[in-house]
Image: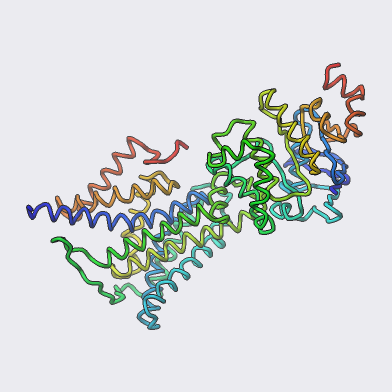
Amino acid sequence: MLALRNISAGYAGFQALFDVSLEVKAGETVAVIGPNGAGKTTLLRVISRLIDSTAGEMTMEGRRLNEVASYELVSHGIAHVPENRRLFPKLTVEENLRMGAFVPQARAHFEERLARVYRLFPRMEERRRQPAGTLSGGEQQMCAIGRALMSGPKLLLLDEPSAGLAPVVVQSIFEVVRRMSAEGYTVLIVEQNIRQVLKVATRGYLLETGRIRAAGTAAALLDTDEIKKAYLGI
Amino acid sequence: MDIFDIFLLEAIVNGVLLGGILALLALGLNLIFGVIDVVWICYAELIMIGMYTAFFLHVDYGWPLWLAFPGCTVVVAALGAALHHFVIRPVLAAEPINQLLVTGGVLFFLQGAATLAFGVEFRNIGVRLPIFEVGGMFLSLARLTAFLIALASMVGVYLFLKRTYLGTAIRAISQDRTTMPLMGVNPSRIFLITSALGGALAGVAACLLVLQYDIHPAIGLSFGPIAFLVCVLGGLGNMIGGFLAAFIFAQFISVGGYFFHLEWGYVLAFLFFIGFMFWRPQGLLGGKS
C-alpha cells in the first residue's frame, strides 16, 4: 500500500533521515520504533508532505506522493494523527470529528462514520459537546484518532499515541490500536514504548539516528539482542 | 413623565442603534484578525470604496437599492479577497509590524486613489429615510434599518461559523494553523474565503452608512479608528467581546453626548477606553497572550 524507497529528509542545515526504505501492506499494523530524536516524527511528517524529502520516492497504492500537497493526502487515503494530538481546543469533540470529515468525499459518510467512532470510543459520545481542550490526555488521544478515522482513511499514521499518558491510559490506547488492526485498518505507528507497540504490531522497523537499523516481524524484533539490550533492559 | 427622561431614553436608544453598526464594523476586523492574525488597518477604506460603489450603482447606473446594495457587498467582498491575495499573502510570514505597515499603505493608497478618481467633493446617495416618533422619541428609520441589518448579518455570520463545515474550519484554523492540512483543508483557501467574508461585512456596513452619511475619500477616518478601539476594548480577535464593547462604546458616545455635547461623547468614550486599558490591557474578553 505505502512504499518508501531510499527517503532522505531534514531541516535547514540538519539531516534527520538517511536512505529510509519501508513498506506497509494492506491490513498490516507496522511499528517504527526507536529512541527520542531518531527521526520517527520526521518520518511521518515526510509521508504527510509537511516536510519535503530531499531524495528517494514515496508511493501510495502505486501513486507517487513526492509532489502531492499536504492537504491532498487525505484524498489519497492517508490520515495522520500528529504528535501531541493537536486537537482544536476550543471546538467541541464533535466539531473536531467534523473537521476530520472536511473533504467532500468524507462529508457524505459523516453520520455513519461518526457512529463508528462513537462505537470505538463510547467516551467521545458522552463528551461530544465538550470543548476538546477540556478532555483528559487519553480522551484527547481517542478524539485525535477518531478525527483521523472520520476521513475514512486506507492508512492511518499514528505519532506516539502513548506519549505523556499515564500507564493505565497507555494500556487502553494500545488496546484501541489492537482493535483497529483487528477491524482491518492499516496502521503505521511510531512509538518509543517498544514492548507495548510490538505486542500489537505485525511488523516493525528500528529507526536510530535517522537510519533503519533492523526490520522484521514484531516477534523477531523483540528477540534481537540489540533491542533486548538497548531498549528492553534484558 | 418628565421631558428630561424621554430625551435620555432617546439617547440610550440611539446608542443601541449606533452599537449595532459599530458591532458590525468590529466583527469584520475581529474575524480577519482572529483567523489570519493580521490587522486590516485599511478596513474603513474598504467601506469607503463600498460607499462609492453603492453610490455609483444607484445614482449613475440607476440600479434600485435592493440590487445596488448586494452589488456593493459583492464588490467589497472581492476587494477583500484581492487584498488578501495580493497584499497580505506575500507578507504572512513577515513581522507583525511589517504586516501592519503594508495594510497602512493600502489605506493611503485607497484614499489617494479615491481622491484622484472621484475628487474631494461630498456626494450623497439621495435616499432620505423618514424620522418617526415612538412614545415621544424621534428615531431615524435609517438608523433603525442599519441596526436591524447589522444584527441580521451578525446572526448570519454566527450561524455560518457554528453550523457549516467551512465556518467550523475557519474557527479551527484560528486555533491551529499547522494541523489544518492534515484535515484535507488548504489553509490558503480558508484565508481567502475569510478575507472575502470580512470584505462582505465591510460591504454591508458601507450600504448601511451610505444611507446616513455623505461620501468623500476621507470618510473612513470618521469610523475606522472607533472600530479599532472597539475591537481592542473587546479583546482583539474576540468576536463576542467586540460585540459587547461596541454597545458599551456607543452608549458613552450617545449618552455622553446627551449630557454634555456631541463631541464630549467621543471624548468620554476615549477616556473610558484609555482608563479601561490601564485596568485590563487584554480587553474585555481577550486572553492573556
Task: Residue A55 in the image: state x and y as whole percent.
Answer: 84, 48
Left or right: B175 with respect to A164? Answer: left
| Relative image position of residue A156 (x, y in whole percent) | 76, 44
Looking at the image, the residue that sits furthest to the left is B2
Residue ID at (24%, 52%) = B253
Q: Residue at x 34, y 47 (%)?
A: B244
Left or right of B31 on screen, residue B1: left
Which of these two is toward me, A144 or B100?
A144
Residue at the image point whose x is 78% and y is 34% from the top: A178
Measuring from the top left, give residue B140's x and y in whole percent.
23, 65
The answer to whether B175 is drawn above or below residue B136 in the figure is above
Can you give x and y, in whole percent of width and height, for residue B246 in the image? Answer: 33, 51
Count of numbered marks: 0
The vertical placement of B207 against A29, above or below, is below
Q: Extreme top residue here?
A: A234
Q: Quadrant of residue B122?
A: bottom left
Q: Is residue B39 left or right of residue A67?
A: left
Q: How are the residues colored? A: rainbow
Tell me what residue is drawn at x 40 percent, y 72 percent.
Answer: B69
Between A85 and A187, the one lying in front of the other is: A187
Query: In this rendering, would B5 be left or right of A128?
Result: left
